[in-house]
Image (cartoon, rainbow, N blue to C red):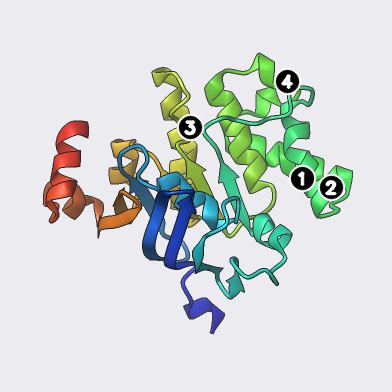
Amino acid sequence: MADQLPRVRIADAHKSFGSVQALRGVNLEIQAGEVVLVIGPSGSGKSTMLRAVNRLEALTSGDIWIDEDHVTSSATDIRKIREEVGMVFQSFNLFPHLTARRNIMLAPALVKGIPKDEAERQATALLERVGLSDKAESHPGQLSGGQQQRVAIARALAMGPKVMLFDEPTSALDPEMIKEVLDVMLDLARDGMTMVVVSHEMGFAKAAADRVVFMDEGEIVEIGSPAQFFDSPVQDRTKRFLEHIL
């Protein structure tokens, strides 16, 4: 049955960029409603794995499924997959000439054919959800980095995704703006959204993550609950990494 399948399944994923092996046989299953934090040093394959989930990166070999949809099959309609998988990047990628509300309205109207008034109501509700009701008519250039990232999250949510992917969503933000973005992500986690988050925000890991995945050199080195991972890691490579970041 579909409801017994993992929400995301990555099987023996390999990805090479020329002579560089970015992913080396990655296997990972994520259940519906689970929040998984992925950490590791720069160049460890974290973002490559994340981008492969909605085929922004094509695997060299291996398979990925979202529920029963075979993401890596050439027969799969990737537009359908991308409707189901919301992605929030390090850079906000908002359209500078559109207001916050219209940035959120655009994809549901164009891709899903939602009537304009319905898309506008949804965008207004999502702006309220991310704490930006008063910024609906503001353009990105009038918003702080944290506010722009919250609009980007609302824009991804507007498609009604099954999974939300976050690729270092706070790394481009000033420290005082990080909390406002993490608070929105915490609310999503509490609401049961399936989330895969590449980030080194350890506070978020301890508050919201069900599991922490540590990657290095294109491989998953260790997986554990936040308590086990941070307090009693098993692998020496994990211990060395944590010594540098904690």
Label 2 close to label 3 by CB (< 8 Å) = no
Q: CA distance from mark 4 to mark 3?
A: 18 Å
Residue 119 position within the rendered picture, expressed as x and y whole percent measured from the top left: 80, 45
Q: Which residue is identified by label 3?
A: 181
Q: Choose between 171 and 104: the one closer to the eye.
A: 171
Density class for disc 1 (Cα within 10 Å; few <14, some 14-19, many ≥20) is some
| Secondary structure of residue under mark 4 | loop
Towards the viewer: 79 or 62: 62
Count neighbours of disc 4 (C-alpha within 10 A) and say few if under 14, some if 14 to 19, many if 20 or more: some
Q: Would residue 106 be visible to someone looking at this image? A: yes
Residue farthest to the front, as pictured:
19
- The one nearer the camera, 148 or 167, is 167
Name the amino acid, label 3. Answer: Val
Distance in Å between CA atoms under marks 4 and 2: 20 Å
Q: Which residue is mark 2?
A: 110
Gap between marks 1 and 2, in whole Å? 5 Å
Kindly indicate whether the residue at mark 1 contacts the one at mark 4 (C-beta within 8 angstroms): no
Numbered disc in front, either 4 or 2: 2
Q: Amino acid at mark 2?
A: Leu
Q: CA distance from mark 2 to mark 3?
A: 27 Å
Residue located 24% across and 51% down the image: 226
Give how far across and how far down residue 107 sits, in percent: 77, 45
- The residue labelled by disc 1 is 107
Question: Which residue does the image show at 47% across and 79% down from the upper left?
Answer: 4
- Mark 1 and 2 residues: CB-CB less than 8 Å, in contact? yes
| Residue type of the residue flagged with mark 1 | Ala
Q: Which of the two discs, 2 and 3, labels the residue nearer the N terminus?
A: 2
- Checking the image for residue 139, the label placed there is 4
222 displayed left or right of 3: left
